[in-house]
Amino acid sequence: MREQSAERDTHPPTGSSDTPQSESEREAKRIIIIMAEADSGADLLWTTRNSFYVGAYQAAIADAADLEGLDDATTLERDAFVFRCYVELGSHEVRGEKRRAIDRLRD
């Protein structure tokens, strides 16, 4: 009888807020948040960012080229992702408009 009581005390109550989340639960919540932002239309760079993170650098560059009418902050972020794609592709030489965009990033 005494052993059963001790065993119950060692297990935390089910559904307790003190119970740490598993890695898969945290990942699922992160994905839900990302999807909600994409559905709201608030993140215009979602496709570009996603393509970059999965390694589809050419697709990210092509998607970024199609984006027009962005505000200054979003334009800078887009340009940063484009240049990161070029770096990942090993294309370190930039000329013309790309060079002017790099200068904007530095300012």
Image (cartoon, rainbow, N blue to C red):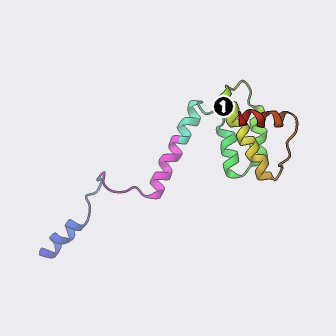
Q: 87 above or below 105?
A: below
The answer to whether residue 4 of the structure is visible from this angle is: yes
Q: Quadrant of the N terminus?
A: bottom left
The answer to whether residue 1 of the structure is visible from this angle is: no
Along the viewing direction, whichever of 82 and 20 lies nearer the viewer: 82
Residue carrying label 1: 74
Residue 35 part of the magenta segment: no
Q: Residue at left 83%, top 37%?
A: 99
Along the viewing direction, whichever of 21 and 71 lies nearer the viewer: 71
Q: 58 above or below 100?
A: below
Q: Is residue 97 left or right of residue 44?
A: right
Q: On the image, which quarter does residue 47 sit in?
A: top right
Neighbour class for label 1 at 10 Å: few (<14), some, many (≥20)?
some
Q: Position of residue 38 (x, y in %)?
A: 59, 36
Q: 1 above or below 24?
A: below
Residue 24 part of the magenta segment: yes
Q: Residue at left 74%, top 49%?
A: 56
Q: Residue at left 48%, top 56%?
A: 24
Q: Position of residue 92 (x, y in %)?
A: 83, 49
Q: Main secondary structure of the magenta part?
A: helix
Provide the residue span drawn in magenta.
17-33
Along the viewing direction, whichever of 30 and 104 lies nearer the viewer: 104
Q: Quadrant of the C terminus?
A: top right
Which structural element holds mark 1? helix
